[in-house]
Image (cartoon, rainbow, N blue to C red):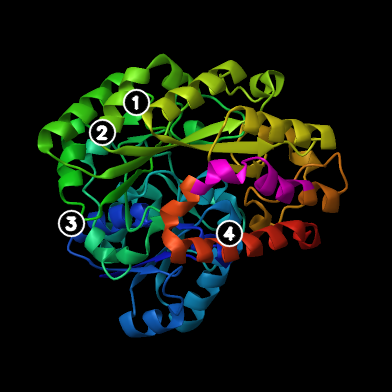
Amino acid sequence: MKILLIQPPSHYPLMDQVYLFEPLALEYLGAGARLEGHEVYLLDARLESDISRVLGEFRPDVVGVTAFTSQVTIAHRIAKEVRELLPDSFLVVGGHHATVRPADFNESAFDAVVIGEGVAALRELLAARERGAPLKDIAGLGVPSPAGMLFTPPRPYTPLDELPLPARDLTARYRAGYFSEWFTPLASIRTSLGCTARCTFCALWSITGGAYLRRDPDRVVEELKGIAEPNVFFCDDESMCDTKRMALLADRIRAAGIRKNYFLYARVDTIVRHPELFRAWADIGLKQVFVGMEDFSDARLAAMKKGVTTDQQARAATILRDLGVMMYASFMVDPDYSRDDFRALVAYVRKLRLTYATFTVMTPLPGTELHAAREAELLSTKPELYDMLHALLPTRLPLPEFYEEMAGLYGKAVPIHRSLPTLLKFGLHGLLLRMRLFGTFLARLRAAHLDY
């Protein structure tokens, strides 16, 4: 059969100009489908927007779409387009939102919803389609129905080492366009799934039932050997949870003679407790660590079950700075912030001497403990507003003033003399483009109160 896999565009196209990671999940799905002899075409609609043309030329038997919460409306629009052009095709939706809120796709345009890990589910689904067998025997599916979505038994996650290597040739025509800030071109790799933390604002640990799934370091090294890009993003939910495994992986990468620039996620407590691990990774090419700082208040950090302290944040910032590894510090602004809180956050970031910091809004994403506790307070249920930039809980400040303060963080928190060395990594042309994008982003953020 002919299988079309679609990566939808972001609901706000500007974000695809800030960072654009390869659709690794779809590359895994494509690899799995090929093992069964199917023909696969992967369409990255962030870079190739004419979905209708591809549908008409490729004429797939099965179409698969993935979506985060902010892309739900886009996924429905794509489904409508598929139904109009190829009414007899079989349409499957999966991804993060389908896993945490499958009932949001309970409409006739969709034939099946994949909940959780999709490689094995898609292979079994395709086999059932070829045999004309019912879907009820395939674990991990939701089947749309006028009476309410019907669910098959849950599917346990496939051990990561049993998955095929992602079919990166499916994105060959796009690969020069994948990047994050100055890391360009950029490949992505997954070495683990899940997280050992239990933060109230995150669903990633609950999706795997609290398990932290790992790949064998030797298997990761073999995949790295086949990656052509000089920059690699470890898209694990949390890369460094298993410190012994990551120390072994660093040794294996060094022994294999692989030299690339690495970007990964890590917690501040891991950095503080295992500085030697980050030193070993710095020696083999670690350039940047994304660190979810979240807040400057120990009380708020405890309330969100972050499991770290501000003292650990300060020590982690020092450790990475001394190693020459940039901390990509991410803070979440509580909608309940007062003006004094915004000022205190600016002062805190400056105190840490950070060279790069981003600011999002604490968002009750579906599937999280935060969402379950505060769903009744939501200001809106528009999927496109679940983008970490819109306040979905009541704000202490009037909305226009809240967004003005949010925009102000970007200009005040990191002084230009600290951020300039980082910005120069873009090169002159890249820096000018970044400045234009940044201006557009801030203008859009200041007007975000009009989106409700």
Mark 3 vs mark 1: in front: 1
The part of the chain drawn in magenta is 405-420
Up-down relation of residue 427 to residue 391 (above or below): below
Mark 2 vs mark 1: in front: 1
Mark 4 vs mark 3: in front: 4
**Rounded to the nearest whole Å, what is the CA distance between mark 2 and mark 1?**
19 Å
Q: How many marks are shown on the rendered structure?
A: 4
Mark 2 sits on what residue?
215
Mark 2 vs mark 4: in front: 2
Mark 1 sits on what residue?
278
**Rounded to the nearest whole Å, what is the CA distance between mark 2 and mark 4?**
30 Å
For the point 43% across and 80% down, which residue is it? 86
Of residues 439 and 204, the one nearer the viewer is: 439
Mark 3 / mark 1, whichever is N-terminal: 3
Q: Is residue 408 magenta?
A: yes
**Rounded to the nearest whole Å, what is the CA distance between mark 4 and mark 3?**
29 Å
Label 2: which secondary element: loop
Of residues 100 and 219, the one nearer the viewer is: 219
Q: What is the x, y in percent for residue 338? A: 83, 35
Label 4: which secondary element: helix
Mark 2 / mark 1, whichever is N-terminal: 2
Mark 2: amino acid: Arg
> Contact, CB < 8 Å: mark 2 with mark 4?
no
Of residues 305 and 383, the one nearer the viewer is: 305
Mark 3 sits on what residue?
35
Mark 2 / mark 4, whichever is N-terminal: 4
